[in-house]
Amino acid sequence: MSTAANPADEALRSATLRAMEALDTRTEPLFDALVRSAAAVTGRPLALIVLADAGRHGLTAHAGASGATSANVLAATALAASAPLEVADARLDPRFADDPLVTGTAAIRFCAVAPIVLGDGMQAGSLWVVDRVPGALDEREREALRQLAGAVGAALDRRESARRGDAAPARGAPSPASTRESERNRRTREALLARTVRLVGVGGWELDLATNAITWSEQTCRIHDVPPGFQPSLEEAVNFYDVAARPAIEEAMRKGVASGEGWDLQLPLITAMGRKIWVRALGVVERDDDGSARRLAGAFQDITLQRRAIAALEASDRRYRKLFQYSPGVICMHDHEGVLLSVNPAAARSLGYSVGEMIGRPLTDFMPPERHTRFADYLLRIMRKDSDAGTLKLLAKDGSEHVWQYHNVLDDDVEGEDPYVLGHALDVTERFRQERQLREWSIHDPLTGCFNRRYLAELAADPTGGWGCIVFDLDHFKHVNDTCGHQRGDEVLVAVATFLRGHVRPQDAVIRLGGDEFLVLLRGADEELTQAVVRRLDADRAAAPIGFTMGATTVAPGASLEAGLGEADRRLYKAREGRPPRAP
């Protein structure tokens, strides 16, 4: 339940009026209701009716609350009020960047102004809505502001007509033509006012304190689901409010009568048809010359939809904050340079840091140096395409490597603000480790640890690199199995794999083709390097766990690896010719 004025909004109102040096801020219920309606319908903290005073070369500013001071008007204010105007961010608009309303205490960033035009076409002033943050109105809000400005003009015309009517006897009776014209203008203005009331959903009410008689406007009757002209007693009017809300409205009325203080309340209400709604009830106190309260008057608005919208936004914000706080997934925000703006506990916990240790630091602080270039490429992609997905490798506080699988999007929809990236990721380190383990198992021989034929097939599918190929066949291996058993045979195979790995470089591959057949692939090797390895192996035969026969060849870049293996096999068989046959 909110009361008369938000302190921040009141500070904005006071600062704006001081900066505008308003001549007069008399409290008038009709104008107060209109400015409050303008603020409500546009969702801005402050609305003002600024009326030019030709006699005093100043203005009257009705701000919907009491307590403003009087002085002179700024030239820039008069200029801004002379035509329809909407300024999304006054600090970025060269016309207003140096205006005291912008640079001073008021610190206005956004303003929208609709001219107030009288029936004779003369501009009497303007209706303002302002805010301390940049923004823009949608078309419905612009139309509502124009209609409300028209309603102010209609009210001014009616007041002027009443004033001229009081003085008519001294000037003589008006002509029939002027009377008909005035009547047409009056009806036009009343119709405009009625449309405006329906558009913004604001009704009026009055309470005569002498008789306790209450008068409701048609719109107020609509809000209460009662027929037009319904006149409730004071008790009936209060009883429309929810039981829990009645003390608040009763106290506001008592306080108003005693001190003259107005109110602005948002309260739950139950209509005559049983609908549960929320209303905004505004009230002011009118006093007699002796200072005693004579009448209470104000405005009434159904704000159920606004309350639901606000409640939905608040619920959405709560859900997001809970999701952010408790989600086991990684949620973070970073700017266009990769500096972390926010990070949820799960992300910090994943890397062994506290949230405070991560915020404000670039993500590259948590990456291996060799990944920095890739991260710069990622920033360029997401700024260009608005989204990006992939994996990031990060270093935890203990030095361990973690893998995040991410899908990030760029948010650059807020005008005047730097873009930032919303990041969502999963710590897939364990999955990545398991997938890598499965990959290793799929391309390695479980007995010897050598690569297997699956790996060979993958290499053969990419003919871009050159290879030195050496194939091996173990001598008399079947005899070892038959006489010493398969366990000893397995030991020999493991020892052969170790022997071969000791004669090649880390980038080369030792492959077990099956049984007692092995293959050494020398990456990028020419004929000279290949033969050098063959000579070393031949010289170390005595250190080998079993005798072997070799066949070697080279495969040029782009040539078929499979064809090269066939040639190495032919050379192996040729080398075996003339040797004693294997034991049966």
Image (cartoon, rainbow, N blue to C red):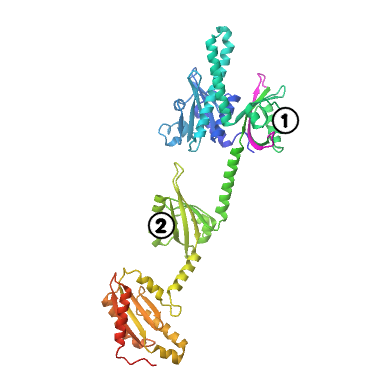
Closer-to-camera residue (71/50): 50
Between 451 and 131, the one lying in front of the other is 451
Say if the magenta span includes residue 287.
yes
Report the front residue among 323 and 48: 323
Q: Quadrant location of residue 216? A: top right
| Residue holding disc 1 | 236
Q: Of the residues shown, which amino acid type is indicated by label 1? A: Glu
Where is residue 367? Give x, y as percent.
43, 60
Determine which residue is flagged by label 2: 375
Other-residue count near label 2 (Cα within 10 Å), few / some / many at <14 / 14–19 / ≥20: some
- Whether 524 is among the magenta residues is no
As measured in the structure, the alpha-carbon distance from the residue carrying label 2 to the one carrying label 1 is: 69 Å
Residue 59: percent from left, percent from top: 51, 23
Whether 88 is drawn above or below 444: the answer is: above
Vertical order, 214 against 322 (above or below): above
Q: Earlier in the sequence, mark 2 or mark 1?
A: 1
Please rate how many residues cluster around mark 1, counting C-alpha atoms within 10 Å: few if below 14, some from 14 to 19, many from 20: few
State the image quarter where residue 484 is shown. Answer: bottom left
Image position of 491 with respect to 83: above or below? below
Disc 2 marks a residue whose amino acid type is Phe
